[in-house]
Image: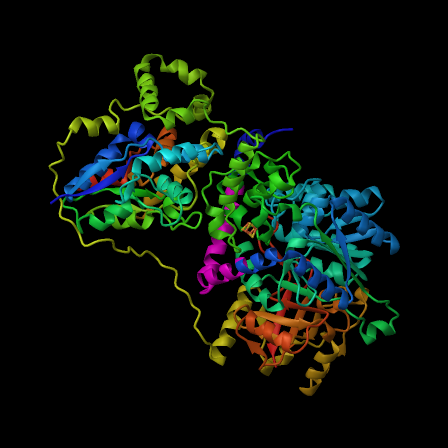
Amino acid sequence: MTTFAQRIAAVLRREDFVERHVAALRYKAGHRNTTIESIADWEQRRETARALKQEVRDDHERFVDSWTRAAREAGTIVHEASTAADACGIVLEIAKRHGAESIAKSKSMTTEECELNQFLARHGITVTDTDLGERIVQLFGEPPSHLVMPAIHRSRKEIGDLFAREGMCDPGEEDPTRLTMAARRALRTLFLTADLGMTGGNFLVAETGTLVVIENEANSLLGTSLPDVHIAVVGIEKIIPRLADLATFLTVLAPSSTGQRLTTYATHYTGPQPRTQAEIARGLGPRELHVVLLDNGRRQLRGTPAEEGLACIRCGACLNVCPVYRRAGGHAYDWTYMGPIGAVLAPALGGGTRDDLPKASSLCGACNDVCPVKIDISGHLHEWRRELVARGRVRHGLPPMLPSLLAHKRLWRVGIGTAKALGPVSGFFAKHSAALQRWQVGGERQLPELPSQSFTRWFRSRAGGESTLRLERGSGPRTVTRDDPTTERAPGYSAELLEQLFEQRLIEAGGETGSSDRLVEAVPDRAVATEPAARLLAARDIHRSMAPIDKHELDGIDVLVATARMRIGQKGACWVDFSDLGSRAQLLLAETLVLLVPREAIVADLDEAYARIAGESLPSCGAFVTGPSKTADIEQTLVFGAHGPRRLVVVPV
Amino acid sequence: MASSVRFFIPCYVDELWPQAGRAAVELAEAVGFRVRVVDAVCCGQSLSNAGAASGRLEARFEAAVGGDDSEIVVLSASCAGHLDSVRPPQARPAVVEWCEWFARHAPDRFPKRVDRCIALHGSCSALRPSRGQPSRGVAAMRDLLSRVDGLVVADPEFASECCGFGGSFATTFPELSVRMGKDKLASLRDAGRDQGPVDGIVSSDCSCLLHLRAIEGVGLPFYHVAEILRSAA
Ligand code: SF4
């Protein structure tokens, strides 16, 4: 097996890759910085998120029990998997019971960890990764290289060539929009025929038994809405205490991850959604929701330097800022979890073969600065180094004499003195000392000159002869301010301001607002409507036909009008209760989605939104929708309509 | 009536960048301090970062500074950061980074003009809080430099990206370390884009400077903050 040192040296020889990768990640990190500047309570949110994760770790089994109990009450089938093999077995068993041959899977690091795709393939079941980036790496036959941007290491040209080889586009295609559309076409067919949908999970809410899945493309929602059976494989560390806590986690996750304010879809699954009357009339059987709670070594992290790593919400921010990851790319880590957080988890979860990863850091601490749950990542890497060296699992790699030299001032002076005296023959040392050779990297970095007089010699030589320089003492430290980020958040919003904010944030997210005075423009004649939407329209003397239920009939529909329950001003988001839909596919398959929302139903932030949701009643399926389906998986180019609607129009009525 | 102050000059500054120590001492004396130098070689960071047992060095440091409550002024942001991370909170004597200390005593304006454009390299320890400790000194460094007439301080793009030194990191992953250094040098050189060409690079960590100077291809001189301030005194 190769070492990280060998792999990184090899990567660095690929100049063009390194340059593109560094630029892409600097760009991503820049997005994050811009977004968080306008979030006034950012630091408090991070601290709250950290404390919540700590609360769960401190009483972990109780939280697992309460989540499991609440989830079962809601009708979710909960499985516990101690190992990756258990998880694979459980999934296979469910798939067999349903006679599934084809699975549509959305991005999930846990299934990567379990090597589930390969396992199911051996049993004749095809798993298709449906996230665009995941699909790209799957077709390349390689693992993801980033926690949230799996194909960030690939150029548009490489992706174009790949798609052409797969017959998905014409040879020579390099345009990210057209490439995305080619993938959309190929995957739409798959969604319509898949037998089973699989996802990971971002959060498990102990209070309500809810599973929350965050995504931009709608591939996850398509995979869980078109097939009847949904299996989520989720690490046990994803549990959070209460529904209201999601306000904090969702507030910190998207900005850290992509620089968005909120991810396009945040779907809350609390038990399998019952079939609607219309679906039952069509003879559709009940849905099933399975959650496989994966341990796979997580419980054993307690008391190791990796323990706090369990708080990770997989936002990828630490990767984006890491100077090592930026130049290495994810594959150099040669492990499921890459970057700084991967290196924290590696010695504990990497089966003893990834002990060199904690060294893959200059301990610069850039990761700690951005981590939304305030994990002391570089601190834990440092702890690992000491622990692994002490246990003899890795070598510290310093020149053997150094510790003694530094501990004894006299020895140190003699050592340095000798080096200086040997000036003429020091070329010999430079050539033959392994450490000095590594320092020089074949002449890329010079050895330092040894000044003839050290500081100590100079200081002693003065022996009381202090400097005659005189300066006037000043009045003390001053703050030199420099473009301090200003925040735009006011403590309270007027109704008008909230409307403006909503519109601005929705536009930022790629959506549009419509006016109720010109409702007809937003819902052209050819539009079809869900039942509640049709009623709302009819009350305004606009008559539109009822939207179909069936996924095949919905496929290719131009404009679909549905309803949302409320808007969130700060995020430009709408809350959609899926029981308002005739079928879940209605939200996902039209080219343009129009959402009608009661004008008065607008709240400032997610905290208020969750208070309302809890006050009414948590639906078995509900989602925050923020703009149209989108992706930036091909060279960071934003493309709308990755899998779901290309346009989203929100009309307050 | 000269008050006295204790300096800790880390091992590599002592032998490899003595000019920073000289400038720091002369400036302290110029504002009326008598400087004493702590009799210790290394704070332990060089070993600790590599994962080697550093307890012996840290104990020696404590022995050298103990029995006297006056604070220790450390001529390196990263050594000060390391000491903070291994010493108990509120440990006596307290440790303070040189820029933070000197900002309390330096003149409000230095007497001489320095008509130069200097790119500022904030070391990781100077830039960001680490292990629960506040960041060490970029603000103080900026404050001090702003008291020199004529001096233009230019900030590089991607200022928060590490220069690639990182102690043992530099020899564990030499190609990577050099690559990071080259990228850092490129952004430092271009830092003056709006303010006129950069003609020097300044930092409060000589370890970064040693690494950058050794790779250097930009033909610019490197300075510890104290050296720039000394030239304005
Ligand atoms: S460790 Fe923190 S910054 Fe890194 S992916 Fe996890 S949550 Fe994000």
Q: Nearer the viewer, residue A377 or A228?
A: A377
The x and y percentages for residue A308 are 56, 50
**Is residue A489 shown above or below B28?**
below
**Is residue A77 shown above or below A433?**
below
Left/right of residue B187 with respect to residue A452 in the rendered view:
right
Q: In the rendered view of the protein, which quadrant contains the N terminus of chain A?
A: top right
Q: Nearer the viewer, residue A565 or A348?
A: A348
Magenta highlight on residue A42? yes
Q: Is residue B206 visible?
A: no
Q: Residue at x 52, y 38 (%)?
A: A327
The x and y percentages for residue A93 are 84, 51
Q: Nearer the viewer, residue A319 or A45?
A: A45
The x and y percentages for residue A498 are 50, 76
**Is residue A35 shown above or below A530?**
above
The x and y percentages for residue A370 are 49, 52
Residue A411 position by quadrant: top left
Q: In the rendered view of the protein, which quadrant contains the C terminus of chain A?
A: bottom right
Q: Residue furthest front?
A: B67
Q: Which residues are magenta?
A: A21-50
Q: Nearer the viewer, residue A298 or A201?
A: A298
Q: Main secondary structure of the magenta part?
A: helix
Q: Residue at x 45, y 21 (%)?
A: A437
Magenta highlight on residue A254? no
Residue B60 position by quadrant: top left
Left/right of residue A540 with respect to residue B189 in the rendered view:
right
